[in-house]
Amino acid sequence: MTSRTRLWVLAISTPIIAFAVIGGYLGQALAKDDTYQHLRVFQDVIQLVLNNYVEPVNVEKAMKGAMNGLSDSLDADSGFLSADLVKAYEANAPLAQADPGLEVTRQYYIRVVSTREGSPAAKAGLRTGDYVRTIDAKPTRDMTVFEARRLLHGAPGTKVTLLVIRGNAAEPHTIELVRERPTTPDVTSRTLDAGIGYIHVHRFSRQVPTQLRQAVDTLSKGGATRFVIDIRGTAAGDLDDGVATARLFVKSGTLTIREAKGQSRETIATQAGDGAVTAPVVLLTDQGTSGAAELFAAALSGNARAQVVGERTLGRAARQRLVKLPDGSGLLLSNVRYLAPGNTPIHEHGVEPQVEVEQPDVEFGSEPPSTDATLQRALELLSQRRAA
């Protein structure tokens, strides 16, 4: 190996080794001999590329590709950040006030988790599971969720253009959306027939426990004795807000378990005064139910406080930390995850419904079915409970 090759190998290998040593769950793997063997293989591959590739190798580009490849093998919220994105992350500046109404994750490309009710994205027909190939002509193949969110937000009235693919469709759809400030309240409610109250939590926030309690009280005064709580497509909000909201329904027991890298598990349990709402509850979930909504669902389901009807949730219940690299770039790594009361993981697994009802596939541009099969099934369950 020439001295020039050694320098190139060192330039590329150093950040990779740093990633393996300090990055997320890979740190544990380094204790095994086979991990060092993989690093040696990687070094050999670099040497082969540098010595045999027909053109001079762009070391910076190769290093970035390797970092993206490693982080891509982790969860959707982990990723490689450029130096500019690291600065933006450390600044912790709030996102611009307007957006098209999309919550996104990553699965090879940026993928739609849910759309905000009444938002430009919802009106355009975007749905959970749609893939966003480009945002304003910028490819999303190596884009992190953090960067995608920054690109989607902007000043009210400005436009963002998305290239979207649904399912196995060969033809992508170009969609231009206008950014708007959110106007949908966190919680809405109404009375259904036969004494059943319907509450839709659109997003979780610090105010949601109070707002949800008020909705239950108002519906109860109108004759509701059983409740449907809809958290389909609910993906916004801090994880702690989902746990705080669960306290309203769970009187005693474990709400969630927090598992951090290098630390013992922390059990988060109920406290005195929890469980103020005792009425029967059914939760509606789908693949757009994510984050705080999943912790809420897991707490109620795990304590036999509610039946979950619908689809398995997304499986996104972790927190990230930034690990900076010497050149100013960094790795955003999930280092904390949350478990359901029965010690089962939520992150990358989701919450399984007791009664499964699949959402129908809808072709791009077509109207969804007029009948809400998931809600109808929930009403049947609550009616049976009343009869019993």
Image: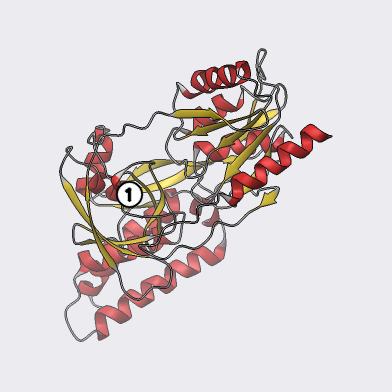
Residue drawn at the location 20% of the way across and 51% of the way down: 160
Tell me where residue 18 appears, x and y as whole percent: 37, 53
* Residue that lies at the very extreme toward the top in this rendered image: 273
Residue drawn at the location 71% of the way across and 29% of the way down: 280
* Residue 319 can be seen in this image: yes
Q: Quadrant of residue 172?
A: bottom left
Tell me where residue 15 appears, x and y as whole percent: 32, 57
Q: Which image quarter is the C terminus in? A: top right
Q: Quadrant of residue 218?
A: top right
* Residue 10 can be seen in this image: no
Q: Is residue 261 left or right of residue 332?
A: right
377, above or below 253, in the image: below
Q: Which image quarter is the N terminus in? A: bottom left
Residue drawn at the location 35% of the way across and 76% of the way down: 170
* Residue that lies at the very extreme toward the right in this rendered image: 388
Circle 1: residue type:
Lys
Which secondary structure lies at badge 1?
helix
Colour pattern:
secondary structure
Tell me where residue 191 appears, x and y as whole percent: 57, 28
**What residue is pinned by disc 1?**
123
